[in-house]
Image (cartoon, helix red, strand yellow):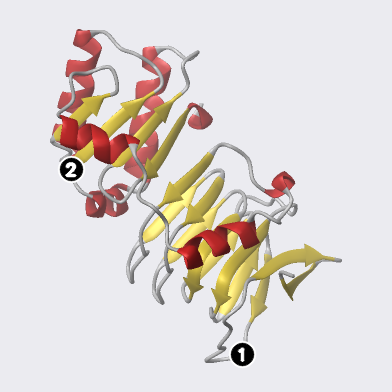
Amino acid sequence: MSDIVNIKSNGKMLEFWLDELSNYSELRSSLIEKLSVNKDFYSTLGKKVMFYGKCFSEAQKKELRNTLLMDFDMSDVYFVDDDIPPVLRNSAVHKEQEPETKRQERDDLSLISSNYFDAKSIVVNQTVRNGMRIECEGDVIIVGDVNAGAEIIAGGSVAIFGRLRGLVHAGAKGRTDVIVVANSLQANQIRIAGKIAVLPAKRQVDYTETARLVDDRIIITALN
């Protein structure tokens, strides 16, 4: 059920992408479950929310708005079929032009086989700071840095479009066909499934690397 709701951030608001074939009860339960697991983290992303995909009745919209306000302090809740203020609609629909360096980073990471990542990912468009913890049953994609003291726990793979200095655990539930990829891997350790790789202190790397399990060991290689 957790895969029927995908949560993203465009830097200005949270985006809830809902499976159009699932019913309201399933979607509501899955959304609340995902928000509850990372409640402290999502509270740092602001109070604006946009729903995409599944359309709801006015009564269902009212219930969702009340739940998000009372339980998660999200006060500005919009649905894509609403009469949305033009400024807000523009920020939700139009993506800002990426700098050339960020586009190049995306191009580099796109070379990785799509077998490692699926469409059921959490995408976070901001730096994950000290004290923040993100947990996801699937894949986690961070467009920003992961600072020391931050934690990313994923059942699937982890991709970081920035510097990795915090703790990352991919395949947290035992999957071994996952990877960790970062544009600058500066963490003290990497975890994949039940294995741990300890990295040299103050490691300085300014190119993209991947970490994966090979013969029951974590191997880190440059992405060419």
Marks 2 & 1, CB-CB < 8 Å contact: no
**Left or right: 137 in relation to 116:** left
* Front residue of this view, candidates 38 and 210: 210
Q: Is residue 169 above or below residue 8?
A: below
Residue 220 or residue 93, whichever sits in front = 93
Q: Secondary structure at mark 2?
A: loop
Image coordinates for residue 58, horizontal then vertical, percent: 20, 9
Q: Is residue 74 above or below residue 26?
A: below
Residue at the right extreme? 215
Q: Three-letter amino acid code at disc 2?
A: Lys
Residue at image point 39% right, 53% down: 97
Name the residue that disc number 1 marks: 200
Q: CA distance from mark 2 to mark 1?
A: 40 Å
x%, y% of residue 45? 26, 51
- In this rendering, the answer to whether 201 lies above or below 207 is below
Q: Residue at x 71, y 69 (%)?
A: 223
Does 217 sit left or right of 91 as displayed?
Answer: right
Name the residue carrying label 2.
47
Q: Position of residue 67 (x, y in %)?
A: 20, 28
